[in-house]
Image (tube, rainbow, N blue to C red):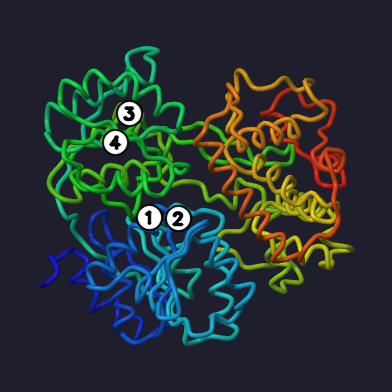
């Protein structure tokens, strides 16, 4: 059965011609053009070798792999597979593997020349995540120094193509024109100090006046999603719709269920996980809050913090495009046309605003002697890189700028260097499992209610108290402030951290109790609550924060 035609199909011959003449290309294709599912198979069939496709999110990686496998008439995990955190469906027969960007960064440590890989595709590169920038820069270094046969393709609907093409040696930019279906854009600004859940409700009502299809509403976080869910229950009942939530911490099976058509129309409340590379079947209406939570480095504590702010015009265009994937649609933006002109054109790259200790350690482990001279797509701020290198030295990962054996061990653990140091020390003191649980608590979303969590002076350490509460939860004892879904995600991360520690560090023969864990998790006396503790947690050796 022939595949339905998509706009990008007409561009594939030109893209393949460009790659036959040179090692890199940038593909600019509008939302809905079909680049995610049609370009990688075309590259595989062109005979370049195995193809790796990088996606910014786990949901997008799984969905794209599933769709490509279906279109090629195969079984997921055979010729086409995926690899994301906690989940891998790929084997020896896999020729096209879709993965998140951090997976490639880790792979480059073990396979620095990417043997057998013929092409790397960076999808939705406009998001400019830290791992995406790092992976592209590392792949370009491999291409220039050892693999001139390696092809690199960077794709996006809203990318600053000139900058990326220049980084890739002034490579050609291939453009695919035409969105699959038109989308009408409407604006609905707030009324005074209108609450977001009330504003979202008005936006949904506006959309339902113009379309009967499924509706996708973008909100900045889980808290906003749940408040909107409660506010929209009346509309959902009257219109015969199911309200579904979609965010990163949901179990994969619940995420995947949102993407499929249901027995009744859907009203999907999502974070930006639904912004790119994902088709939610049946969506013809979008409500965009225009808000996003993004990480930003806080120099006062030496770690990243989430901040709430306005999205970019590029982000708004991506969200609008979700309404036109399967048929004509409508998008309601919850701001005015005047406000829209004041939005930034593109997102600021993460490399310019987040903590760089992790990438710096990865580059040192990869053999980069001078991290400050590494050729990024866009150079990080000098002061941020300097602080990152100072932290690595204080953690014992480097000595006089050179990587230590401890640093190599830390680099093999895919967590922040602070937490890697804590996990190594915990392993040596015989509390690997509990140190892994503490590391998971500090690296994942807090599963405890913020307003009613244990007081910071209720035990020797907030981390230790929360570790005990989660251990009690696993034994069947409930905790009034513990979110079960959040606890399950933390437990899953802790299990992976513990297994990684044993794989990387070997079996631990030592046996330690609360005293050993307390030494690892002990917080500074100035920590006033769980949020500040998460932002100022110290290393296994009780070093002060970089601030």
Q: Secondary structure at mark 2?
A: loop
> As displayed, is residue 186 above or below residue 89?
above
- CA neighbours of label 2 inside 10 A, class few (<14), some (14 to 19), many (20+): many
> As displayed, is residue 365 above or below residue 14?
above
355 or 428: which is nearer to us?
A: 428
Discs 1, 2 touching: Cβ within 8 Å: yes
- CA neighbours of label 4 inside 10 A, class few (<14), some (14 to 19), many (20+): many
Q: Secondary structure at mark 1?
A: helix
Q: Is residue 387 left or right of residue 193?
A: right
Nearer to us: label 4 or label 2: 4
198 or 80: which is nearer to us?
A: 80
Nearer to us: label 4 or label 3: 4
Question: Which residue does the image show at 66% across and 59% down from the upper left?
Answer: 499
> Where is mark 2, residue-wise?
56
Q: Is residue 511 left or right of residue 465?
A: right
> Where is mark 1, residue-wise?
60
**Residue 413, percent across and down?**
68, 60
Residue 465 lies in quadrant: top right
Q: Which mark is residue 338?
A: 3
**Residue 314, percent across and down?**
36, 46
Nearer to us: label 2 or label 3: 2
Q: Which mark is residue 268?
A: 4
Q: Secondary structure at mark 4?
A: strand
Question: Which residue does the image show at 23% across and 60% down from the upper left?
Answer: 33
Upstream in the sequence, badge 4 or badge 2? 2
Residue 153 lies in quadrant: bottom left
Q: Is residue 209 left or right of residue 427?
A: left
- CA neighbours of label 1 inside 10 A, class few (<14), some (14 to 19), many (20+): many
How far apart marks 4 and 1 lie (CA) works out to 16 Å
How far apart marks 1 and 2 lie (CA) works out to 7 Å
Upstream in the sequence, badge 2 or badge 3? 2
């Amino acid at each position: 059965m022939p595949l339905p035609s998509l706009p990008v199909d007409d561009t594939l011959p030109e893209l393949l011609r460009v790659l036959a003449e040179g090692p890199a290309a940038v593909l600019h294709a509008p939302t809905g053009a079909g680049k995610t599912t049609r370009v990688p198979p075309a590259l595989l069939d062109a005979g370049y070798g195995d193809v790796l496709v990088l996606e910014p999110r786990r949901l997008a990686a799984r969905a794209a792999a599933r769709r490509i496998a279906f279109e090629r008439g195969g079984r997921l995990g055979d010729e086409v597979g995926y690899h994301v955190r906690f989940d891998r469906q790929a084997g020896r027969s896999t020729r096209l593997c879709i993965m998140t960007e951090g997976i490639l960064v880790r792979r480059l440590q073990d396979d620095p020349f990417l043997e057998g890989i013929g092409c790397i595709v960076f999808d939705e590169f406009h998001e400019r995540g830290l791992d995406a920038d790092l992976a592209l820069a590392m792949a370009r270094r491999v291409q220039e120094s050892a693999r001139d046969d390696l092809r690199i393709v960077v794709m996006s609907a809203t990318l600053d193509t000139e900058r990326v093409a220049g980084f890739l040696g002034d490579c050609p930019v291939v453009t695919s024109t035409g969105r699959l279906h038109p989308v009408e854009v409407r604006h609905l600004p707030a009324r005074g100090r209108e609450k977001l859940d009330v504003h979202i409700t008005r936006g949904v009502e506006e959309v339902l006046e113009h379309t009967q299809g499924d509706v996708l509403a973008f909100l900045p976080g889980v808290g906003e999603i749940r408040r909107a869910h409660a506010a929209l229950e009346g509309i959902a009942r009257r219109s015969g719709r199911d309200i579904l939530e979609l965010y990163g911490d949901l179990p994969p099976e619940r995420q995947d269920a949102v993407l499929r058509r249901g027995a009744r129309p859907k009203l999907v409340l999502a974070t930006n996980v639904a912004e790119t590379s994902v088709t939610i079947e049946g969506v013809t209406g979008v409500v965009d809050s225009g808000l996003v939570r993004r990480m930003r480095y806080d120099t006062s504590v030496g770690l990243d913090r989430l901040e709430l702010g306005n999205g970019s015009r590029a982000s708004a265009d991506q969200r609008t495009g979700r309404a036109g994937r399967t048929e004509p649609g409508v998008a309601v933006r919850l701001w005015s046309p005047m406000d829209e002109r004041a939005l930034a054109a593109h997102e600021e790259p993460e490399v310019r605003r987040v903590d760089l200790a992790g990438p710096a350690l990865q580059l040192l482990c990869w053999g980069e002697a001078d991290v400050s001279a590494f050729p990024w797509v866009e150079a990080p701020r000098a002061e941020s890189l300097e602080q990152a290198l100072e932290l690595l030295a204080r953690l014992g990962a480097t000595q006089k700028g050179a990587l230590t054996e401890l640093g190599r061990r830390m680099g093999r653990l895919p967590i922040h260097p602070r937490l890697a140091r804590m996990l190594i020390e915990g392993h040596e003191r015989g509390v690997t499992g509990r140190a892994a649980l503490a590391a998971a608590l500090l690296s994942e979303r807090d599963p405890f209610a913020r307003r009613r969590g244990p007081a910071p002076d209720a035990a020797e350490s907030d981390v230790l108290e929360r570790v005990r509460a989660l251990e009690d939860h696993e034994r069947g004892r409930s905790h009034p402030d513990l979110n079960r879904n959040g606890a399950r995600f933390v437990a899953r991360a802790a299990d992976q951290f513990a297994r990684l520690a044993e794989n990387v560090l070997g079996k631990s023969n030592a046996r330690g109790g609360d005293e050993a864990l307390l030494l690892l998790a002990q917080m500074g006396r100035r920590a006033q609550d769980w949020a500040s503790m998460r932002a100022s947690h110290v290393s296994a050796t009780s070093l002060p924060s970089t601030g």
